[in-house]
Amino acid sequence: MSAILEVRRVTRRFAGLVAVNDVSFALAPGEILGLIGPNGAGKTTVISLISGTLAPSDGEVLFGGTSINHLPAYRRARLGIGRTFQIMRPFPGLSVLDNVAVGALFGHGGGHRRLAEARERARASLDFVGLGSHVEQRADALGGPGRKRLELAKALAMQPKLLLCDEVMAGLNHVEIEEVIEVIRKVRAEGISVLVIEHVIKAIKSLSDRLLVLHHGEMIAEGTPDAVLSDPAVVQAYLGKKRQ
Amino acid sequence: MKTLRIVSIVIAAALLAAVPWFGSDVLVQFGINALLLAVLAQGWNIIGGYTGYASFGNSVFYGLGSYGVAIAMVQWNLPFGVGMAFGVLLAVVFALLLGLPVLRLRGHYFAIATLALSQVMAAIVSNIGIAGQNIGLVLPPLNNDRLFYELALLLLAAATLTVWWLTRSRFGFGLIAIRENEEGAAVMGVNTTLYKVLAFALSGVFSALAGGIHAYWITFLDPESAFDISLNVKMIIMAVFGGAGTVLGPVVGALSLSAVSELLASEVTSIAGLFFGLVIVAAVVLMPRGLADMIRRLRGFGWRYFIENIRASRL
Amino acid sequence: MELLAQILANGILLGGLYAVMALGLALVWGVLNIVNLAHGAFIMLGAYAAWHLYTYLGIDPFLGLPLTALLLFVLGYALQRGLLNLVVRAPMFNTLLITFGLEVVLTYLAQLAFSADFRTINPPYAGSNVQFGGVVLPLVRLAAFGVAIVLTVGMWLFLLHTRLGRAIRATAQNLLAARLYGVEPRHLYAVTFGLGLALAGAAGALYGTVSQINPYIGASLTAKSFAIAIIGGLDNPLGVIVGGLFLGIVESLTTLYIGPTFADVASFGILVLVLIVRPGGLLGKTA
């Protein structure tokens, strides 16, 4: 089975700082791949390199077998790559529904042409993540957990083939985390491949098929959650940090 | 509720259209100026209010439209309509050529770049022969204020309908997304570069058409008045005062500020400008989101509306 | 060849004056992120202040520079503390609008108070020249140039090496940290803006000795200051010297070789080019 996403020896430098260094991995269709690592390890940079927000200094990103290195972010979105942002910035002036409708209007394959259809899809997306009752609210009126789900709904309304989740569980309590895990499992059940960045180790351990560990921009471990989390190098990297 | 709004808008439009038949000559002339300013404000609204790129250089499009009509009619003896089309063509070409590099800039850099462009254009045009250089051009006279008034009103209606269309179209949603979070918009599939340039060109088209009407009406133009830099700030103030990013805000803002300015000017000339400046300062502090927002929220909030605005923005 | 040397000399002297004109703007913009569209109007006020000090109190414009600067500093402090601090956390656009409104108000007030006549500050040495290597340097312009360089370098040293200067830079970068250190941001912002206006005032006093003053010079001086600040780059206080000199020389050359009407085209054309190609300015970091 060919990988839906392949990251080949990707490096990203920022004026003297190497944020991501020679990272390679592949994501199989329908897989949930977890990406963990201490703060500043370069996880969000990896996501930005895949979504097209940043261009790699070296290396290649392949989606569905073809290189997308030279495609701008919006083209990658239309190919079927959706992402959430760690620092959530909804479109504040718009309602929750319309926030998600943007995803439906412009997503995979160019999205819907008509606003009415897009809003329908947005409604479906919001129901899927459990925000169905909030559609008419202003987006900036949502609390933290609500905004996380809004991010997910926006990305899902694009009908992506690959979903990049950047810390959608940060700041949530146990119940809310369980709910988000359920949503992501539902997403995979729809046939969407998922790459999840997370700090909540317990959650990502139960959610992921495989785990990748990034530290100082380099990949230091890859494999099943159990194997990776007992790897001494990984433990060392997390030394001093809380373990759940 | 919605039918009430539509009915009141239709009535207002009908009243406006009837002005040349009931009003004095002075009123009609004031009307033409105010309506054209409203068109400029509405045009700016597209790029500044909805896309979030505050252009300080739309006066260029106004000037290009003016000169398009003037050159076509004076130098080439073409009819007004062709002149307007020519003006629009100039505006679109300018928006495409210079919009691309300039729209890559963010925030105040974009504002300054457009301001600088408007200065450059004024200076360049004053050196071009076909444009009559510094002396300007004199157009064939057409003494029909009523016609110009209705033309201006028609143009304003077209501009407002276009903005209304934006609020319910895929293109408009894309622009709003760009305004609220450009990076987020790109990641969701919006071709931000294309959309920004289109919005810029669209706003330019309306400014150019307004310039063309104005040129034919005034019968005379020279580089300084055609590329009048103060127009930039006027259209922005009017749009923001009424409510940038709303459909009717710029119209209300332009008409009301024009009226206030005119009333003051007839009373005490030097105080008029001073008052205008004070109004702007007070408005930015107390009602930064414009009249439209104030009217909507005042009912619920009362005086606290103003205090909240200050509290949200103060250091 | 001698003509070229003279033109270059003119350009350099002009550039020095331009640099100090833009200095206040660059300071407030680069440090506080406040874009002051009324900057030119404050230069105008400084010029009038110096004119009045000279005409009614006989104070030489150069010697009285500190006084002019002080007057504008107080005005700046009050304005920032009383008005501008109210909109600092709003979108940048609001500061643009409010400073524009201020510009309108100041211009009209000046028109009311001083009438629209043209004035100059004419100290007795106004007509003297200094000869230097075959080039004629008007004394007043030379003095203005000297003061400009002193002020600019002084500002650079101040920001980088004094406690207050560092506090100002720190506050601008991180309000929360500043507060934790016991610094009162409102006061510091007001001090910085006051400094910016003090510099504008000084520039105005210098301007008044070499050019004519009237209430309407504000707008074009603002535009020019913007061009200089951006061309030089906002990251480095010395950038205004580069920007000022660059613009001064370009304008001198353009006036001679192409024509006076093209001087504006040249300045703003270069501004647009710089913004497009190197938004950080000639001395700034590459974008």
Image (cartoon, coloured by chain):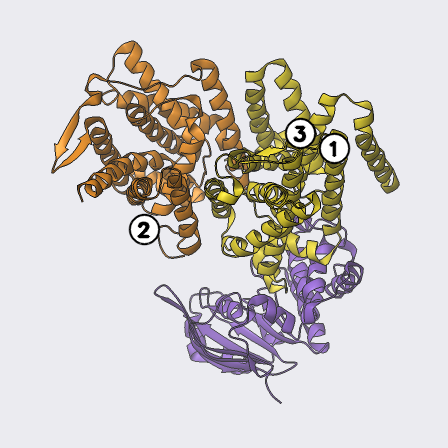
Chain colours: A purple, B yellow, C orange
Asked whether, in this view, residue C258 is left or right of residue B172, the answer is left
Q: For the point 59% across and 44% down, which residue is it?
A: B75
Query: What mark, if any, has residue B149 been given in the picture?
Result: 1
Discs 3, 1 touching: Cβ within 8 Å: no
Label 3 sits on a secondary structure element that is helix
User: Which chain letter goes with mark 2?
Assistant: C
Q: Residues within 10 Å of mark 2 (few under 14, many from 20)?
A: many
**A105, A155: nearer the viewer:** A105
Query: What mark, if any, has residue C283 been given in the picture?
Result: 2
**Which amino acid does the dot numbered 3 rest on?**
Arg
Q: Position of residue A34 (x, y in %)?
A: 56, 75
Question: Vertical placement of B117 versus A43: above or below?
Answer: above
Asked whether, in this view, residue A132 is left or right of residue A207, the answer is right
Asked whether, in this view, residue C39 is left or right of residue A44, the answer is left
Q: Position of residue A51 (x, y in %)?
A: 56, 69
Residue underneath mark 3: B304
Asked whether, in this view, residue C147 is left or right of residue B76, the answer is left
Q: Residues within 10 Å of mark 1 (few under 14, many from 20)?
A: many
Q: For the point 37% across and 33% down, which residue is it?
A: C192
**Label 3 or label 1, whichever comes before in sequence order:** 1
**Which amino acid does the dot numbered 2 rest on?**
Leu
